[in-house]
Amino acid sequence: AQSVTQLGSHVSVSEGALVLLRCNYSSSVPPYLFWYVQYPNQGLQLLLKYTTGATLVKGINGFEAEFKKSETSFHLTKPSAHMSDAAEYFCAVSDLGGTTGNEKLTFGTGTRLTIIP
Amino acid sequence: DAGVIQSPRHEVTEMGQEVTLRCKPISGHNSLFWYRQTMMRGLELLIYFNNNVPIDDSGMPEDRFSAKMPNASFSTLKIQPSEPRDSAVYFCASSVDRDNSPLHFGNGTRLTVT
């Protein structure tokens, strides 16, 4: 069975500061890992995705995440926070694989990111 | 590309009433997913279709919930009868069967059952 744990339901950072959102996963097979972002009153949008290959994945809006198998982690980072980054962020895992990895996604409970001016 | 279109955006109904949520996936996408989002349980996959066929409905909470996909451009999620605990935001998402194809979510339907 697969699962995702996001540490910290709320994170606040100052504008220009480093953003670090934590995600740990559990999977019985090599996982597909995802970060999605949800802005108010909208659906989720894919930020980035790890399937195979390079463990450092770059996504949209300057975000990146590193797959660390030994730590079963996939933390999301951004060097300098912007006001527009305020949103809820979801880590997700799929161990079904398949063509897209979308077929059996398990989402974390989300981390609400607040940016302090 | 209009994205995934869901209707209505908001639905308020009384307990016992039938509720129908609608979804139009992105043209050309052959997988469609229904999710439910609540504060208590987060995002839960209810059911997903591939090429209009239901593949996995193990997330559908009860027999009161049913979903159909009569064609590639339309899906419904029905709750009959509705209960207050069904109050949530329901999301539809679609994707295409191609490596690294992401899920595209609609803006959701916020359901309130009183």
Image (cartoon, helix red, strand yellow):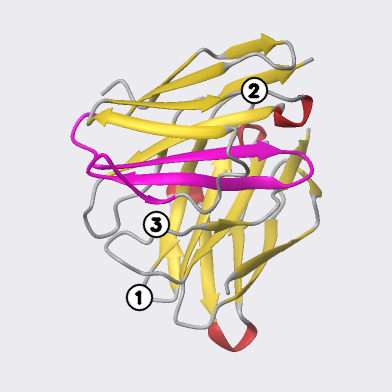
Which residue position holds label 2?
B81
Q: In this rendering, is residue B81 above or below A46?
A: above
Alpha carbon of mark 3 to alpha carbon of mark 2: how far? 28 Å
Q: Residue at x 69, y 59 (%)?
A: A20
Disc count in the image? 3
Residues A42 and B93: in front is: B93
The label on residue A103 is 3
Amino acid type shown at disc 1: Thr
Q: Earlier in the sequence, mark 1 or mark 3?
A: 1
What's drawn in magenta, residue-wise?
A: B27-56
Q: Specify the farthest residue to the left.
A: B28
- Quadrant housing the N terminus of chain B: top left
Answer left or right for B88 relative to B91.
Answer: right
Answer left or right for B100 relative to A77.
Answer: left
The reply to whether callout 3 and callout 2 are in contact (CB within 8 Å) is no
- Assign a secondary structure to mark 2: loop
The label on residue A52 is 1
- Please state the chain letter of the residue tagged with numbered disc 2 in the rendered image: B
- Please state the chain letter of the residue tagged with numbered disc 3 in the rendered image: A
Amino acid type shown at disc 3: Glu
Q: Residue at x 61, y 80 (%)?
A: A72
